[in-house]
Image (cartoon, helix red, strand yellow):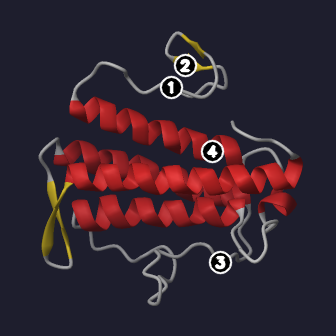
Amino acid sequence: MPGATIGGMTTDGRAVPPMQAGEQATLDGWLDFYRATLVGKCTGPGDDLVRAAPLPPSSLTLLGLVRHLAAVERNWFRIVLAGEEVPPLFHPDPETGHDGGFELDGAGLAEALALWEDEVRRARAARAAAGPDGVGSLAGRPVSVRWIVVHMIGEYARHCGHADLIREQLDGRAGV
């Protein structure tokens, strides 16, 4: 576990996932840990730097990661799990299958974080409504809430690693 812990929190304020809990609390704890990690990595450098892509040839930016993960939250929890008929937040890339959001428009970090926070709030509600045995539908095939949460943990872990590399190149800050 990165950073020291004090009373169930890391020294940077993230809640440590429970070390002895049931499946649902453990999975939700890890997903929330990575959600908080993303915010920690993407806040602080200012709007100019969050738009920078310092790792050529990659065009990844911190702002793009926040926007993309808002789209991923919407897709997996609201559309796939809850069956809501809401449009995608951004234009998905048909070649890669990505949920979009990596491209930058006029939005700044505050707007992107507000959008992401709203999608996380709605995702938590969809997750709670589904319960531990909930099942959604992806292209007509059933997908369990467990699969979705594990997929989201992997999605966040991968993108938090990207954010860590980007942030280190931007201002030398590694880790959260």
Q: Disc 3 marks which amino acid?
A: Glu
Q: What distance separates the C-alpha of mark 4 from that of mark 1? A: 13 Å
Residue marked by disc 1: 15
- The residue positioned 42% from the left and 27% from the top of the image is 17
Q: Which mark, by number, is residue 103? A: 3
SS state under label 3: loop
Residue furthest to the bottom in view is 95
Quadrant housing residue 6: top right
112 displayed left or right of 23: right
Q: What distance separates the C-alpha of mark 2 from that of mark 3? A: 34 Å
Mark 1 burial class by Cα count in 10 Å: few <14, some 14-19, many 20+: many
* Looking at the image, residue 58 lies above or below residue 73: below
Q: Position of residue 34 (x, y in %)?
A: 51, 42
Q: Earlier in the sequence, mark 4 or mark 3?
A: 4
Q: What distance separates the C-alpha of mark 1 from that of mark 2? A: 4 Å
Q: Earlier in the sequence, mark 2 or mark 3?
A: 2
Residue marked by disc 4: 39
Q: Earlier in the sequence, mark 4 or mark 1?
A: 1
Q: Find out whether the residues at labels 4 and 1 contact each other: C-beta distance under 8 Å.
A: no
Q: Earlier in the sequence, mark 3 or mark 1?
A: 1
Residue marked by disc 2: 9
87 displayed left or right of 68: left
Q: Position of residue 125 (x, y in %)?
A: 31, 46
Q: Find out whether the residues at labels 1 and 2 contact each other: C-beta distance under 8 Å.
A: yes
Q: Position of residue 151 (x, y in %)?
A: 35, 56
Q: Disc 4 marks which amino acid?
A: Val
Q: Earlier in the sequence, mark 4 or mark 2?
A: 2
SS state under label 2: strand
- The residue positioned 32% from the left and 31% from the top of the image is 26
SS state under label 1: loop
- The residue positioned 47% from the left and 90% from the top of the image is 95
102 displayed left or right of 84: right
